[in-house]
Amino acid sequence: MTTSPQESAKERDTAPPFQGHPQRWLILGVISLAQLTVVLDNTVLNVAIPSLTDELGAATSDIQWMINAYSLVQSGLLLTAGSAADRYGRKKMLATGLALFGIGSLAAGLADTTGQLIAARAGMGIGGVLLLTTTLAVVMQIFAPAEHAKAIGIWSAVSALGFACGPLIGGFMLDHFWWGAIFLINLPVVALGLVAVVTLVPESKNRQGDRPDLLGAVLSTIGMAALVYAIISGPEHGWTSARVLATAAVAAGVLALFAYWESRVPYPMLDLSFFRDQRFTGAVAGLVLITFGMGGALFLLTQHLQFVLGYGPLEAGLRTAPLALTVVLLNFSGVAAKWLARLGTPVGVLLSMVLMSAGLVAIATLTGQGYAGTLLGLVLIGVGCALGNPAMAHALMSAIPPAKAGVGAGVNGTLAEFGNGLGVAVLGAVLNSRFAALAPVAATSLPAALASADGEAERGRVLDAFSSGVESSQLVGAVAVLLGGVVAAVLLRRAERADSGVVSA
């Protein structure tokens, strides 16, 4: 008996939709563990700043490079790693990333100079880049489209948890061990993750994937490194100095060449046509500025809690924990998803950025009145993060073809890492400039300035100068986040209207 074409089409239409991998929630837990480890190392170093300053003699610029070496390597390589994962297999890249991240963590834990630690952090970034691209790509592959929003919400909550709990875990380790232990704790997690990935995670790849864009990776890495170096060097050498201007010129030239290359090469690391989708562009604007504000804010807040208010590493970490707890509570309970569904993506994103901006303002202006102001700011930031991060990640991934899931995850990770690194650099530069202008003594860091101060009165003026620098930096971050919310909401709203027009037509 033969089947007519009409019957075949009917069978395809009535075929059960993809229900997702039978072990998808367990796999999500495995890849979230890997994701958590990588994101933790974005902020775990923040509470170790006083220890590194004392034990390694690190200047402020050294500290910033210890943090930025990790994120800058990832910013440059995430897109290429995502393309490679699509072509060669996401499971392979995930396992390789875990192994490389473990080796880098061991080297960082055993480093005894600032140069060695910066190099080890860069090495950790190479492993982390493979993890960040594959985790979100795997989520998109193993879950049915109807579950994407929920799964991304959990994935995003784990990311935010790692981002905010870094200071807490780092503080606990520093209270009981030496600073290198904050890296060595990654080793058992890496070992567990490797076993779980090999046994549980299914392999997936795009057999027609593009070749990795190696030149694009080199150009983007050099361009962004030069850009952040110019920002970090500005306060120390002067914004109009030959060194800073030359580095800024190199950054502009290389990034312009990168954009030209990507528009001409047949297998671009970043397909510039994605930016024609306003949903994609809106998510880009929001993700960069949300991580810009959060990364810079936590970098500044942990220093203020320890240097100015005198808290130990563990207590400083505990006092930043409400941010993570708020995100986890709202995302895992499903409250944030319900709010977002009710408000819609554009309004939800705008509200999230307004709340985060208000939180940064509260931290900047109310910290001097005690911890209550800081707590209010952290909770507001947490609510905003719980709403905004999943919405923007889902909007970005929805604008990219499923076969390019690795590239999409690379774009998402690149934006997050670049925003975080740029936030530390820019807000750190604002802090350094303000501190240098107001401090009664010349020094490269707050501890050095306090050591040079003559008497308690001068020490008080040094601390006041540092506090003023932190306040100014937080306010700059608040403006950036609010601007990102407005731009993202407008573009996402336009994309929704355009989609509605297509559907109605």
Image (spheres, helix red, strand yellow):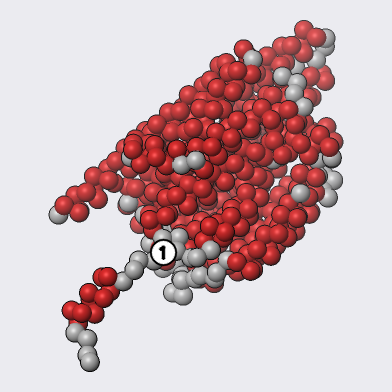
Q: Can residue 81 be seen in this view?
A: yes
Q: In which quarter of the image is residue 400?
A: bottom left
Q: At x 63% / y 53%, what residue is drawn?
A: 33
As displayed, is residue 233 above or below residue 215? above
Along the line of sight, the residue nearer the viewer: 338 or 313: 338
> Is residue 223 something that shows in the picture?
no
- Please name the residue shown 66% across and 27% down the image: 319
Q: Is residue 15 above or below residue 46?
A: below
Judged from the image, the secondary structure of the residue bearing numbered disc 1 is loop
Looking at the picture, tell me which residue is in the foreground, 373 or 214.
Answer: 373
Report the quarter where the C terminus lies: bottom left
Q: Which amino acid does label 1 sit on?
A: Gln
Q: Where is residue 164 in the image (x, y as percent from the top left)?
A: 61, 37
Q: According to the image, label 1 marks what residue?
A: 19
Corner quadrant of residue 63: top right
Query: Where is residue 323 drawn, in percent x and y?
Result: 58, 32
Q: Which residue is rendered at x = 75% and y = 35% of the image?
A: 171
Residue 197: percent from the left, percent from the top?
Answer: 63, 64
Q: Taking 466 as reference, is 419 left or right?
A: left
Image position of 140 (left or right of 367): left
Locate the N terminus by quadrant. bottom left
Pick out the residue farthest to the left. 505
